[in-house]
Amino acid sequence: MDKGYAAWAARWRVPLGFALGVAYLVFAQPSLRLLIAGAAIALCGLLLRAFAAGCLEKNRNLAMGGPYAYTRNPLYLGSFLMGKGFAIAGGSWVLGLAFLGFFVLVYWPVMRREEEYLRQQFGEVYGRYAAAVPLLLPTGRRAPLAGEPFRWELYRKNREYEAAAGYVVAVVFLILKMLLR
């Protein structure tokens, strides 16, 4: 992986995500059926992100409990599900393709970059963890590793409530856009 590109992707992922969000606001064409289905998928992603954030002490411990026993990147998997859900709710396959391209081109190198950082920070412990747990998509098997249980103070410290607020705002926006057409 090109380390320069991965650093660029890490730096620009949030501004590019906002740009994609603006395009979403303009081009989304929700229907009731798509909104219900997409919001349900996005809610699953939000719940996964919340669970993961409550098990994560950034830069202190290697998270291996909760959803981290199934995937090394439950926050990104949750973000993917949220994006996929909102792409469905928005009723545009172009938005869905744009999100998929964004995720692959931006988040994949960011995951790999973070993996290198964790290998440096946690050494052999991370090596054993990475050998037992898939990078993104769970296989259904739980890795037999010890880890932190969910704690509300970690959820708050990691500011995951911001994702919950974003979910609510997006759903309300889609409802209003659908009703005002």
Image (cartoon, rainbow, N blue to C red):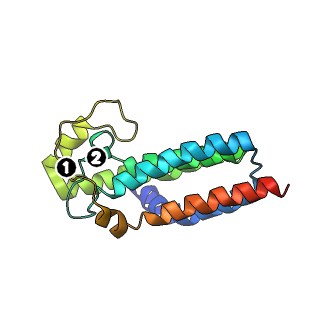
Q: Does 65 sit above or below residue 18?
A: above
Specify whether 112 is left or right of 103. left
Specify whether 1 is left or right of 127. right
Q: Mark 2 points at which residue?
A: 66
Residue 147 disc label: 1
- Find numbered disc 2 in the image and state the secondary structure of the residue it sits on: helix
Q: What residue type is disc 2 on?
A: Gly
Question: Circles 2 and 1: CB distance less than 8 Å?
Answer: yes
Residue 123: percent from left, percent from top? 16, 51
Report crowding for label 1: few under 14, some 14 to 19, many 20 or more residues within 10 A (C-alpha). some
Residue closer to the observer: 117 or 25: 25
Q: What residue type is disc 1 on?
A: Gly
Alpha-carbon span between mark 2 and mark 1: 7 Å
Residue closer to the observer: 81 or 97: 81
Q: Residue furthest top?
A: 140
Q: Quadrant of residue 10?
A: bottom left
- Find numbered disc 1 in the image and state the secondary structure of the residue it sits on: loop
Q: Residue furthest left?
A: 124
- Residue at point 31% right, 51% down? 115
Query: Which comes sooner in the sequence, label 2 or label 1?
Result: 2
Report crowding for label 2: few under 14, some 14 to 19, many 20 or more residues within 10 A (C-alpha). many
- Residue at point 69% right, 62% down? 22
The answer to whether residue 113 of the structure is visible from this angle is no
- Residue at point 31% right, 62% down? 152
